[in-house]
Image (cartoon, helix red, strand yellow):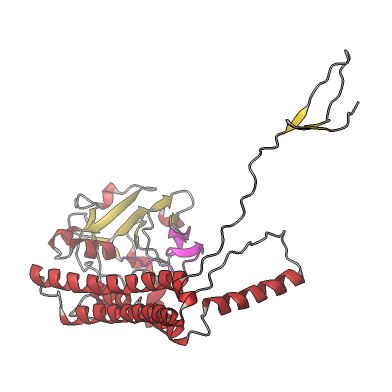
Amino acid sequence: MAEEAKNGSEGTVVAAQRQGGDGAALSTAVVSPDAVQNPGLPPHRKRVGDLDPKKAKRNERIVFTLFYLSIAGSIGAVLAYMFFPIETGDPTAIRTSTVFIGAGMTLSLLGIGIAAVHWGKALMADHESIDERHPTPSSPEVRKDAVEIFEIADEESGFSRRSLVRNSLIGALIAFPIPGVVLLRGLAPQDIDPVQVFKHTMWDTGIRLARDPSGIPIKASDVTIGSAFHVIPENLHEAEHHLDEKAKAIVLLMRLNPEELNEDEERKSWSYNGIVAYSKVCTHVGCPVALYEQHTHHLLCPCHQSQFDVSEHAKVVFGPAKRPLPQLPITVDDEGYLVAQSDFHEPVGPSFWERLK
């Protein structure tokens, strides 16, 4: 049974009562008259730039000046890289180069950041708005309204109207990544062609295959069918740049039943009694191919799941890699140790090398 609402000085009683079996009321809802009211938005206070056109023009000058300072910082970092070389290895030269390059890139980034913040706070339209959410997908009318909103935003931000601010922003964004691009040159060898460096490894005629990382030479009798060895050149410790040379020369050694090897005539001499050696550097993006399935004779790259069939010259059977793993020609010396017949006959690593042919 519902009762009518009773309005009294103490509050509003909402009749939402029901009677139980004994006639007693089960519930009563009371709405308090002193509930917190929506205070609304405070009166809008205009900024100084909104009231004084000269102040607005001054703010605009500050913004595009900061963008130009960002461009100057990017150029300064490039010039510092050029005029403060570090090839000599002198600590003072390295310190000086680092300070000036860092200062230029800091000015470049801070100029963009501070200018963008000042633009938003001092120049863009300053008013409150409510963005209503709508279910998706939007209707044609809503999409039309969205285009109008972008046009309004462009007008309020002044992006199209304030040409100096817009152009300086575009220039700063273009200049900002330039120092990073230039600095990448410092990662490559300075006195020789990097392409030639990556084309050759430490493998050569008679270099013994050794276990990684111990450097212990491997005898052919140590390699059983189904086994796999991580291999480096025995003379790797003699390299001036140990890790760089190892990254190019790492090899995976496996032994299969000779009857399971499907070898081309010109490559039959590259293996020894079912023992084959292939570069561990994936031909996709250079990850180490180190997972071997002895039953399928597949090598798996854990990065992007490329698979290579060892029984058929490590040809690609799955994944994004585009060419087989380079094979290292091997044989044995007079003492029974596995040795290289030569270097790889093709460059190791990603298929970038395909474009150099």
The spot of residue 79 in percent (x, y) is: 22, 82
Quadrant where the N terminus sits is top right
The spot of residue 231 in percent (x, y) is: 27, 55
170 or 31, which lies in front? Answer: 31
Please give left or right for residue 315 compared with residue 109 in the image. Answer: right
Q: Residue furthest bottom?
A: 163
Quadrant where the C terminus sits is bottom left
264 or 254, which lies in front? Answer: 254
For residue 282, above or below residue 125: above
Q: Which residues are magenta?
A: 304-328
**Residue at the spot x=73%, y=69% of the render?**
142
For residue 23, above or below residue 232: above
23 or 293, which lies in front? Answer: 23
Q: Residue furthest front?
A: 9
**Residue at the spot x=25%, y=64% of the render?**
340
Please give left or right for residue 279 compared with residue 156 in the image. Answer: left
Please give left or right for residue 258 compared with residue 138 in the image. Answer: left
**Residue at the spot x=21%, y=68% of the render?**
205
Question: Is residue 347 visible in the rendered structure shown here?
Answer: no
